[in-house]
Amino acid sequence: MKINWKKRKRDEGKPFNRCGDLIEAWNQLQAWYQTRLGITLAEQEQALLSATLTNLFGYQLLQVGRLTGDDWLSNSRVSQCNVMDFPAKDQLMKTASFQGLPEFLPIQTACMDVIVLPHVLEFSQQPHAVLREVERVLIPEGHVAMLLFNPFSLWTPWRLSLGWRRKVPWCGRFMSTTRMKDWLALLGFEIVSIQNYFYRPPLQQTAIMQRLSLLDRAGGRLWPIFGAAKLVVAKKRLVTLTPIGPRWSRRKARIRTQPGLAEPFQRKQKRNTHT
């Protein structure tokens, strides 16, 4: 895979969203998830994430950030599930979990089996740092499940018209599947699955959204890549060491190929015994 290192370095140096600070943007995103559209989207995301977590096993699971007051990890088979909130003065949802920043996870290295990122990368100013922290705290063969908004969907006109006004979620940096594959490959992750979902336009009218629910059933079959959001599941690859042969074997090969040198006594003795 050919990697454009200049473009990657340029991407790391510039801000990745127009929403401002992550804490401020996250509070606005939590408020947006309490709207009619946000509630409808959250129901579908919770169901999709619950179905995915039933196939991921381990002892420790971490959800980075909470968008709603509901428990999105109830169907997980992991022994211990934790939720990390972001430090903020005015949180919409008070929880008993610990606090921290996704760019600097207060967790030991290689101790988590599963990590869930619900729309964290789109509103972080350092998404590369977030993924590096995920790679650090995951054990080998551990999984990360990421909920991401899709830049190419029916929501694109709203994002282009409202994003510059610093309105959440439209001001976030929606990342394409190709870019996510590139970033994950650089960190040693293997894509397990990508599921697109929510094919309805971003309307706040409940009656209209209920009538358009058939688009969700048809969209997955007819135009799957145009879902408003996607669930990306990746696995941290196990790095194996490549064995290196002993150096003395190479030295024997050089002695054998160079003319004019005496042959080792042990080999000559064996040859005489055969004759």
Image (spheres, rainbow, N blue to C red):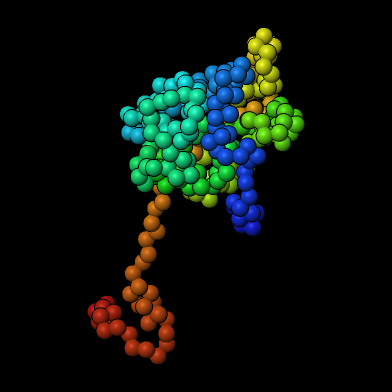
Image check: 36 left or right of 70? right
Give me the residue at 71% from left, 33% from top: 165
In the depicted view, which residue is nearer to us: 210 or 243? 210
Is residue 152 something one can see in this rendering?
no
Q: 67 above or below 173?
A: above
Give me the residue at 38% from left, 37% from top: 113
Q: Please provide percent x and percent y for residue 124.
A: 56, 40
Give me the residue at 39% from left, 77% from top: 253
Q: 68 above or below 234?
A: above
Give me the residue at 46% from left, 20% from top: 70
In the depicted view, which residue is nearer to us: 135 or 181? 135
In the depicted view, which residue is nearer to us: 243 or 61? 61
Q: Please provide percent x and percent y for residue 195.
A: 57, 29
In the depicted view, which residue is nearer to us: 224 or 247? 224
Which residue ends up furthest to the bottom in the rendered image?
A: 260
Image check: 71 left or right of 179? left
Total labels drawn: 0
Q: 52 above or below 274?
A: above
- Quadrant holding the C terminus: bottom left
Q: Please provide percent x and percent y for residue 45.
A: 54, 23
Which image quadrant is residue 203 in? top right
Which image quadrant is residue 222 in? top right
Q: Please provide percent x and percent y for residue 255.
A: 37, 82
